[in-house]
Image (tube, rainbow, N blue to C red):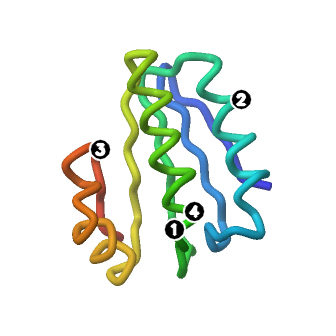
Amino acid sequence: MSTISKDGSQVIVKPGRDVVASMANEFRAELNSQIQESPAELVIDLAGVEMVDSVGIGVIIATHNSLDQKGGKLKVINIAEDIYGLFSTMRLDRHFSVVKAN
């Protein structure tokens, strides 16, 4: 279960665990319920996440596509160095904001 907080028109979702196939359906459902409210910006905070597999990346890309259709923006923050490298290699940072952890 992710932690979800709202700050004006921004929604912040913190999965708090690895974004992998075993939790993907639950995570997808949580994100979709937030997208239905048409936030201006949806932030996925990956603090504490050490692994994102191909299914997890698919969930994030689908979230971006759904938000884009509704005029919203996706931002993924606090990404571990190796996950950031994967996102950059896949050029996901050209489609939505990707921010490394400090």
Report the quarter where the C terminus lies. Answer: bottom left
SS for callout 1: loop
Residue 56 tag number:
4
* Crowd rating for badge 3 (residues with CA inside 10 Å; few <14, some 14–19, many 20+): some
Residue 88 tag number:
none
Residue 37 lies left or right of residue 62; in this view the side is right
Sequence-first disc among 1 and 2: 2
x%, y% of residue 101?
A: 35, 70
User: Disc 2, disc 3: CB below 8 Å?
Assistant: no
Sequence-first disc among 4 and 3: 4
Comparing labels 1 and 2, the label whose residue is closer to the camera: 2
Sequence-first disc among 1 and 4: 1
Comparing labels 1 and 3, the label whose residue is closer to the camera: 3
What residue is disc 2 on? 33
What residue is disc 1 on? 47
The residues bearing labels 1 and 2 have C-alpha atoms spaced at a distance of 21 Å
Residue 96 tag number:
3
Look at 69% across and 68% down and name the residue there. Answer: 21
Sequence-first disc among 2 and 4: 2
The residues bearing labels 1 and 4 have C-alpha atoms spaced at a distance of 15 Å
Comparing labels 4 and 3, the label whose residue is closer to the camera: 4
**For the residue marked with disc 1, what is the amino acid?**
Ala
